[in-house]
Amino acid sequence: MWSVRGHWKQMEKTVAGKCLNQFWSVLLPLCLFLFISALFFDFCGLKQGVLINFSARAPKIFGQIHPIVDECVGQYIYVHNLPSRFNDDLLEDCHSINQWYDICEYLSNSGLGPQLSNSGDVDDFPNKSWFATDQFLLEVIFRTRMKDYKCLTNDSAMASAVYVPFYAGLEISRHLWGFNASVRDAVSNDLIKFLVEQPEWKRMWGKDHFLIVGRVTWDFRRMPNNESFWGSNFLRLPESENMTILGIESSHGSDNDFGIPYPTYFHPSHDSEVFEWQDRMRRRRRQYLFSFAGADRPQDGDSIRGEMMDQCRASRDKCKLLDCAFDKKNNCKTINVMQMFQNSSFCLQPTGDSFTRRSTFDSILAGCIPVFFHPVSAYRQYLWHLPKEHTKYSVFIPMNYIREGIVSIEKVLLGIPEQRMLAMREEVISLIPKIIYANPSSKLETIEDAFDISIREVLQRVKEMRSVGRGERSTVG
């Protein structure tokens, strides 16, 4: 031991020894600094909910390990691997889904449907992002988008939310007509039995689960204790009421049911396609003051469509009407509807079989200001995607004013100052990115579409439920 110390002292006297002393005098404080810094970053990162990873794969510059921030913290989603009878098998048996028309051809292109092409010299569809999309296929489109979601995880313990890829709308479509209640309820009841047996359910008793329904909410809300009523009981089940439900039309009396846009015909692959379409709608010259595409509902005593269509005919060249009753001449095909909306300043959106219409989003896509006659048609529905100040982008005329002949639609719309109308049109055009679903085969770079907004709001909703303790065990378990 003594000889070693003596040897060390001799080294100190040499040039090399002095250099070695200086090396250690610099290296030891540097190592201490890096160690303290690592602890500091780790503490701050965890406290702010950001995961900082000091793994071996982190880049090294001048010997220092630089932390990698996990951008998916708080955004991870776990997708349930459901038995195929709840989704894929329904697509295999697509001919049985709808008794009114064969939906199989619309399942092409990941649910977007056949690609639309221009007819003659008219450039109605300026790129390859236009499709004949069926209004009831949002479940398929959404699931395809989820497969490429940037923050998927196979570890459900890491997930902030759990997606249930059940094709509820396609399933109930097979049984809405001519089947008893037990058949209409069977598959959705089996789904609930499957979910409650999974470990993911017991973490928040389903409050972190969400699913998409591609039909209006009333198709899943049969009145209790009356099996002769329309639809299934799926969304009235206690377990379903724990989950977040996203649908093309929500129940405005439920706090777990949220409306998201119907799918339109436009599914862009690049941001530039969206910007170019918006500019095109700004430049569009609009021939008609207002227009309507649809059919009368003479059997519905609450409908105002008959009176509204009569007013349109009386307005002559100021209103364009596409009567879709039976549509023997195929007047209401996609290209005709979109041309009419693009040529109109205002588009009438009355209630029909339900409060909402796909036509609302087609008109917004065309830069046409929607005119509503019932607040549930939009204002109490699409809270995540449309402005709260509905006067910025739409006109509201109460239904009874039309039914009782109190107002003239033409006079109401002519009474809107031109500058205000142009501001409303610009607001409508600015909404286009928020109401479209991008092509699942690509990715928009700077634009949030309807899918992105829906996912963001679901994650925020689950986060808020966790923070107030609503994820604790409920009566459902």
Image (spheres, rainbow, N blue to C red):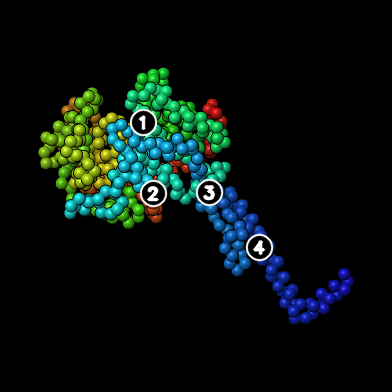
User: Of callouts 3 and 4, which one flags the residue occurring earlier in the amino acid sequence?
Assistant: 4
Observer-side mark, 1 or 3, equals 1
Give amino acid for label 2.
Answer: Pro
Horizontal and vertical percent for residue 441? 39, 51
- Of labels 2 and 3, earlier in sequence is 3
Of the numbered discs in the image, which one, if any, rests on residue 174? Answer: 1
Residue 33's disc is 4
Q: Secondary structure at mark 2?
A: loop
Q: Determine crowd level at label 2: few under 14, some 14-19, many 20+ residues with C-alpha closer than 10 A.
A: many
Report which residue position mark 2 lands on: 440
In the image, taking residue 245 as reference, residue 394 lies left or right, namely: left
432 or 392: nearer the viewer = 432
* Circles 1 and 3 in contact, beta carbons < 8 Å: no
Q: Quadrant of the N terminus?
A: bottom right
Residue 409 visible: no
Above or below, comparing residue 275 to residue 258 in the picture = below
Name the kind of residue labelled 3 in the image. Answer: Val
For marks 2 and 3, give the CA distance. Answer: 23 Å
In this orientation, which residue lies closer to the viewer: 458 or 137?
A: 137
Answer yes or no: do the residues labelled 2 and 3 have beta carbons within 8 Å?
Answer: no
Q: Which mark is residue 73?
A: 3
Q: In the image, is residue 417 above or below residue 240?
A: below
Q: Residues under labels 4 and 2: Cα distance?
A: 47 Å
In three-dimensional space, the C-alpha distance between marks 4 and 1, rounded to whole angstroms, equals 67 Å
Residue 68: x and y, percent? 55, 57
Q: To which quarter of the image does residue 270 belong?
A: bottom left
Q: Pointers 4 and 1 in contact (CB under 8 A)? A: no
Please rate how many residues cluster around mark 3, counting C-alpha atoms within 10 Å: few if below 14, some from 14 to 19, many from 20: some
In this rendering, is residue 286 above or below 15? Answer: above
Task: Estimate the x, y position of residue 394 in percent, counting from the top left.
Answer: 27, 40
- The crowding category of the residue bearing disc 4, from other C-alpha atoms within 10 Å (few below 14, some 14 to 19, many at least 20), is few
